[in-house]
Amino acid sequence: MGNQNVLQVTSGNWDSEVLKSEKPVFVDFWAEWCGPCRMVGPVVEQIAQTHSDKIKVVKLNVDENQDIAMKYGIQSIPSLMVFNKGREVNRTVGAAPKETYLKFINDSLSK
């Protein structure tokens, strides 16, 4: 879990790290008990390592930050969202291979 590329965000720093980010932000909504989330974790970290020039990658634990999860209507996890200039531009739900997420990010950034 000690990956310096992936920032753990919370309700406390959500605005500053996500909504006010100069770069687009890829958010992984996850929880400890979620099996598919554990599969997605390493993929998200790889994306953070290879694409940090164009997107910021963060994770939000929905159990510890339920207010944020509710605000964005997160029904099932993993949910992954792209934010740009403070607003949600795209979201996808469920575990997927890295290529799928990269296409999702690229599509989101071209919106």
Image (cartoon, rainbow, N blue to C red):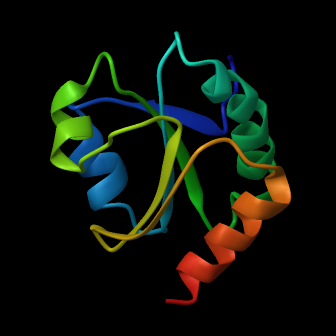
Residue 86 position, x and y percent, is 27, 67
Residue 95 position, x and y percent, is 68, 41
* For residue 2, above or below residue 86: above
In this rendering, position of residue 21 left or right of residue 58: left
Residue 29 position, x and y percent, is 45, 37
x 42%, y 37%: residue: 76
Residue 62 position, x and y percent, is 35, 26
In this rendering, position of residue 14 left or right of residue 31: left
x 28%, y 61%: residue: 20
- The one nearer the camera, 4 or 76, is 76
- The one nearer the camera, 106 or 55, is 106
* For residue 67, above or below residue 106: above
x 57%, y 89%: residue: 110
Residue extending farthest to the top is 33
* For residue 74, above or below residue 108: above
- Which quarter shows the N terminus? top right
In this rendering, position of residue 21 left or right of residue 36: left
Residue 39, quarter of picture = top right
x 70%, y 27%: residue: 3
Q: How many numbered marks are there?
A: 0
Residue extending farthest to the bottom is 111
